[in-house]
Amino acid sequence: RKEVEQDPGPFNVPEGATVAFNCTYSNSASQSFFWYRQDCRKEPKLLMSVYSSGNEDGRFTAQLNRASQYISLLIRDSKLSDSATYLCVVNIGGSSNTGKLIFGQGTTLQVKP
Amino acid sequence: IAGITQAPTSQILAAGRRMTLRCTQDMRHNAMYWYRQDLGLGLRLIHYSNTAGTTGKGEVPDGYSVSRANTDDFPLTLASAVPSQTSVYFCASKRTGGDEQFFGPGTRLTVL
């Protein structure tokens, strides 16, 4: 079983739609969680951190369920510019330099006009 | 330089040749990382360095070596390239106490 699992998609949605991605992780000692965004043939960039209380950044909402070991990302009012691959990322070592990130394979989103 | 740079941008290499991928950051981050990204497998950690002078093995270290002589540079060397090392290679760095990793633009390597 992969340490971080995501549905690769692609998710094809019309502009304005709401779309949700889920991700599960296997290591119960995981300490911090993130969503990264990766555009085609580019480097990954941090989209948002994920906190136990849930957090929102504009049209994006991330939630963490430690009991069930899953993370979600909700995108409201999808824009064409949201088309990208979204990587679920888990840090199993905390914020010290020894922390290591484990990446899911990514979920691809295509927003259509 | 702003952030992390990698060189070359892309390279086609004959099997058996030696190749060094360069990575330089100007953010004075202590930790640096090398990943490879392959279709369907996501990003996998090759080697890392928590601080200048130290290195460690990641998930897929075989066939690769790294050095960390100073804070800014973290080169990745393929001593004798094989076709299975065809991939996109990303270098990343992280400041002490932070969680976010900042990535370079990547190097596309093809080994024939």
Image: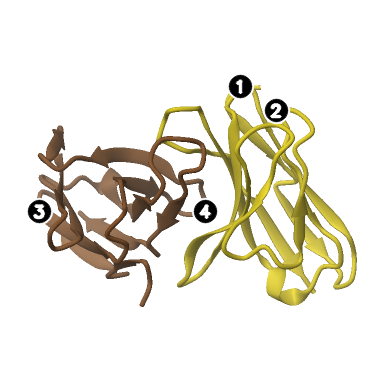
Chain colours: A brown, B yellow
Q: Residue most toward the right? A: B17
Name the subunit of mark 3: A
Kindly state the secondary structure of the residue where label 4 is placed: loop
Q: In percent of the image, x 59 and y 29: which residue is there?
A: B30
Say what amino acid the circle numbered 1 marks: Arg
Q: Are marks 1 and 4 in contact (CB under 8 Å)?
A: no
Say what amino acid the circle numbered 4 marks: Arg
Quarter of the picture containing the C terminus of chain A is bottom left
Q: CA distance from mark 2 to mark 4?
A: 25 Å
Mark number, residue A17: 3
Q: CA distance from mark 3 to mark 2?
A: 43 Å
Out of B84 and A15, give the one closest to the viewer.
B84
Residue A11 is situated, as x and y percent measured from the top left of the image, at 23, 66
Kindly state the secondary structure of the residue where label 3 is placed: loop
Q: CA distance from mark 1 to mark 4?
A: 26 Å
Q: Are marks 3 and 2 in contact (CB under 8 Å)?
A: no
For disc 1, the neighbor class at 10 Å (few under 14, some 14 to 19, many from 20) is few
Query: Which residue is under mark 2?
Result: B72
| Camera-nearest label, 3 or 1 | 1
For disc 2, the neighbor class at 10 Å (few under 14, some 14 to 19, many from 20) is some
